[in-house]
Image (cartoon, rainbow, N blue to C red):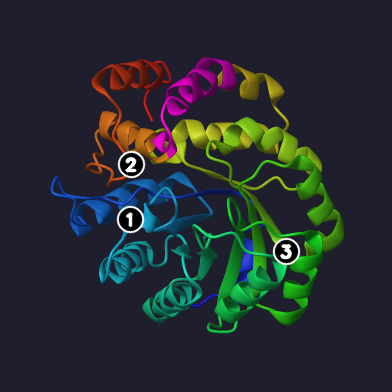
Amino acid sequence: MQYTPQDLQQVMSSGLLSFPVTDFHANGDFNAQGYAARLEWLAPYGATALFAAGGTGEYFSLYGDEYGQIIKTAVDTCRGKVPIIAGAGGPTRTAIAHAQEAERLGAHGILLLPHYLTEAGQEGLIAHVEQVCKSVKFGVIVYNRDRTRFTPESLAILAERCPNLIGFKDGMGNIELMSSIYMKMGDRFAYLGGLPTAEVYAAAYKALGTPVYSSAVFNFIPRTAMAFYEAVRTDDMATQHKLLRQFFMPYLKIRNRVEGYGVSIIKAGARLVGHDAGPVRAPLSDLKPGEMDELKALIDQLGPQ
């Protein structure tokens, strides 16, 4: 089923979204069979959409034909089950090439990841996003993170120029900026909370008017991730606080020990629950044995997933 940009915006307007990790063999090569099995395992848990080759999927480490292989595997595996939104980013021409490849392979839209490394002014960022949006017909979600930081005024310009720009993902956690963007843009965009462990910020973002977020821990504790989302949706603060104290706060202590552990700890969790995705690629590094033990203890107390 092909999604119009408006269809994708509707998908993003409710429910829990997630970013599956990308499976690699021990030698670091893409493991298509393992990746397909992972998506088949996660799809029935109820995520509204899955992001293939996103940040948690190590988009920044992919090379050559791997991108197309990953997107094709995701689209083929999840066809008729759950929409696939592809990551695309880096330099403008790379982002365009990947966006067009994702569209050709049947993805339902893209998350436009940061351009990386160099700073850029608003005029340049607007040109970058506009060129990517105009290179495809399907929906585009822009990611506010790191070097790619948009003002409300820039987003208003892009919204006017690019009808298929339908979503805004926040990876900064600047409540003042997020509030300014939401007040200016209203329902022109679908909004997605996208900080590294979004559950910690979910209640605050819902109060702001943007209740949808993406869960990385869905990769290894999908039942708990869905239970937390349901608690946010129904304003069940008791359940939210219980899970924050029991799991998420001690989990953050592990995650914050090393730069890049935001991805590594997700692959570690997947390994511990019997869905090993292989190692992370350099320059990321895997968790150490003692940290794996700490994470296992946190997972075990949550019960079966």
**Residue 189 numbered mark, or none:** 3
Q: Mark 1 — residue?
A: 61
Which stretch did the figure color magenta?
244-262
- Pick the quarter of the image with the C terminus: top left
- The residue tagged 2 is 284
Viewer can see residue 94: yes
Q: Is residue 164 above or below residue 39?
A: below
Between 100 and 257, the residue placed more toward the observer is: 257
Element marked by disc 1? helix
Does the residue at mark 3 contact the one at mark 1 (Cβ under 8 Å)? Answer: no
What residue is shown at x 43% (from left), y 24% (from top)? 257
Identified at 66% across, 56% down, the residue is 149
Q: Is residue 297 left or right of residue 271?
A: right
* Residues at marks 2 and 1 touching, judged by CB atoms closer than 8 Å: yes
Name which residue type carries label 2: Leu
Examine the residues drawn in magenta and state their main secondary structure.
helix
Task: Give the Cα separation between the discs numbered 2 and 3.
Answer: 33 Å
What distance separates the C-alpha of mark 2 from that of mark 1? 9 Å
Residue 43 is a magenta residue? no
